Amino acid sequence: MATVRFRVNGKARSVDADPSTPLLWVLRDHLQLTGTKYGCGIAQCGACTVHLNGGAVPSCQVRLEDLSGADVVTIEGLSKQGDHFLQKLWVELNVPQCGYCQAGMLMAAADLLKKNARPSDADIDGALSNICRCGTYPRVRMAIHRAVAEQS
Amino acid sequence: MNDLSMDRRSFLVSATVFAGGMALGAARAAGQPGRSGPWGADAPAGIELSPWIEIAPDDVVTVRVPTPEIGNGAMTQVAMNVTEELGCDWSKVRAEFASIHRDFVEGGSYTSGFLPFFSGHGTDPVRMKQALQLGASARERLKAAAAARWKVPVDEIETRPSLLVHQPTGRKLRFGEVAAEAGRIKLAAEPALKSQSEWTFLGKASPGKLNLPEMVKGETVYGIDVQLPGMVYAALMQAPAQGGRLKSHQPEAVLRMPGVRAVVVVDPAKTKGAPVKPKATFGLQGTAAQSGVAVIADHYWQAKMALDALPVEWDAGPGAQWTSTEAINEARRAILAKAAGKSIRKAGDVDAVSGGKVVEGLYATPLCENATLEPLNGTALVTGDAVEAWLPSQDQGQAFWVVVDETGIAPEKVKVHQTYVGGGFGRRTLSDDARMVLAVAKEYPGKPVKVIWSREETMRQGRYRNPVMTRFKAILDEQTGLPKAVSAEANATGMALPMGYADMPYFTSGIIPNVRLATSDLPLNILTGAYRAPCYNSHAFITETFIDECAIAAGIDPLEYRLRLLGKWDKSWSDCLKIAAEKAGWGKPLTKGEGRGIAISNWPKGALRNEGTTMCMVAHVAVSEEGTISVKQVDVAFDCGRVANQDAVRAQIEGGVIFGLNTALNEEVTVKDGAIVEGNFDEYPILRLADAPRLINVHFDALSNNDRFEMIGEAPMGPIGPAVGNAIFQATGKRLRTTPFRKHDLSRTAADIASETGVVVTSLSR
């Protein structure tokens, strides 16, 4: 066991657990932040995507021992009131179906737009490799296009 | 229809004001977003106008919905149905899941008069009518309460959204101001429903799902997100070859690992059995516990680490006879070679037909896994003589009775709470997963136990898509090119449904004079179950590929051929074909290496007129020199009668196209020594955003306006696979008779592609 201090959604947190525990399970089981989802555990599906020090990563691949001093943002911290422009568009365009993948999808999309305000379709394809079993991809793409149009 | 008189109770007054009513710290959703669940109270709560409708003093209307929400919008649809008649402001409507415990204790508050289960879609005719009636009844009682308050005749009162207005004086009351009084009013007679032409909401508005604002904040509580005080976690492993047994394990090797509390064994013989006759929706067959072992720990990661380290030996059992997928295919071919199948549709005499071109083929689909993105899981607390469970079930009426059966606890002591569901696609209908949760939790009583299947365990312990292998043969009429005889045998395993096969109007409408369709069964130890649109997802691919081959053999355009074959059938089928083709630019020239294909089918009632959802798709496909398939455009025309929420229907069709496309292009689990080989998404590919067709055009022009609001989620699983396969044939001249297509080599040289001419031989005659 090891105590590791880092920040989650702007708050200082301290977690005492096995150093190998993936950030995914630290968030879900130790910090009760269940918006970040377990889908595959091997960085294939993207359901567990969070922002680590400003960039999108699969949280299943980050170990607790590597988090010391890190800054983590989860879906719960993407905006204060759930009013990030992507969250609003996701509701307006009825993007989610079952919704299980959508936290990861939103975190990946927010990261893309932060780094590239006018992504091409190829940029979107490259940045969003998240799996959605319900098949919401057309609406995800549409929402990102709308976001680009509205932000510019 | 006398379901309403049978079900008076649902409309009766029960103005009871209870606080909370929650057990074990699982607080109700109200006031505690994020950490609470979407499940409703197990006893009357709030100001109720029926067990279904609660109206709070601030006008918030809570609709208690028995239908789970798996992403199709069924929860929202039921609330919409109530809203249409109640006349409340949609922005004040919320929904929660009805309690099956309450349903049981009260003798059917939610089930009577309905299909006897909690599953299904939001526009089933019986359910839809009852939801409308519940809304109308509540509205009339609100009006009566306002009339009593004002001492005026009730017919002077009109409703505005969430308002009651006294017309002569303009006085107003909010719904919430009179809800408690309304709850005590009993109507002399149930009010008549509006005619559909008077609807102002259903079929007019297209609201998004009610739960989206929470969902985009990560607050939606799926099964895997349930949090309870004192909860512990279990990681589960079942016999790798289904039906196998735990031979030995060494718990002492892991009991000292951090956080580990116990190692428990799941022994199917320990299923207690229900103390009363269970009324499970689908029966209990196929829900048996599987031999397994679980590690229980303070946190899931600890449980998983210990399970991975646990020395375990298994007896493979009889499933090991299936040494490979090829062994299964060989067994299927051997059964078909005997031609001893059971006839399920017969017309004329196929054996007496001779002469004419013969079209013959062997087609097959594989085992596939539902791959819901939320892995299987569930949480349960077993104490002495009671049990409480939180389950991401597709059918509470099934889950409840499985819990009763596994624990042997009396149903009145059983509480099952419906969570949100991170994808169902049929995997969570039988509740075999719920049984495993209880089988583990009952070995560790007194603490809530959250049992999580890893992705690998979820994928290797599926209830797989029923694989179908079919031999089809047609003899074509020399003049018309249409079949004068069709014979076939479809081999499946377990539950065999005819949709997309024996119910296709080609074979039922009489246009083909001689028909013999048979089925046969392959007993398989690998367990099969419901996978989005069971059997239809195979049969429609096979039938529509075969029909395409007949068209090509006859030298007739595949669209024209289908129109002729449907000449004795409903116009709606022909409309779907024509509209999808026209919108897709059928017949217009394409670049070399590209093709268009068409297919049509109906879920779930193809053989009946004005029933089910008929759906036609045209796929535009490009196949590269390397053999990579890309689907550029899909045009969809369909007839489900009418639609209640256009955008919800569009979303289901878009998603269904992509799901079905993945089935056709990518999906197969393979078998080695009775166990499933593939474990995760690196071995079981799922289409990503980059791979999805850029254009999925959903056309509403083929709707017949027949008075039905048929289910929509399954229908796309029929036509998409064959439309793409038929397009691949047009593009390359290669006929794909088995899925997944990615396992076929479609590569060819640039010179080959340049010489491809397309194989449509006649132009359209219309």
Image (cartoon, coloured by chain):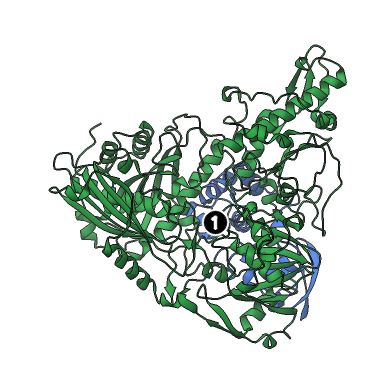
Chain colours: A blue, B green
Question: Do we see residue B737 in this rendering?
Answer: yes
In screen coordinates, is B523 left or right of B446?
left
User: In the depicted view, which residue is nearer to us: B536 or B184?
Assistant: B184
Please give the name of the residue rendered at 84% of the width and 35% of the height, measured from the top-left corner.
B57
Q: Is residue B144 above or below residue B252?
A: above
Instruction: From the viewer's perspective, tell me whether residue B129 is left or right of residue B109.
Output: left
Q: Position of residue B116 (x, y in %)?
A: 61, 45
Residue for point 17% across, 43% down:
B477
Give how far across and how far down residue B456 sits, in percent. 55, 71
Give residue B375's quadrant in the image.
Answer: bottom right
Q: Residue furthest front?
A: B276
Residue under label 1: A132
Q: Position of residue B739 (x, y in %)?
A: 37, 60
Q: Quadrant of residue B381?
A: bottom right
- Element on which disc 1 rests: loop
Q: Nearer the viewer, residue B577 or B376?
A: B376
Mark 1 closeness class: few <14, some 14–19, many ≥20 residues within 10 Å: many
B703 shown above or below B729:
above
- Of A118 and B67, nearer the camera is B67
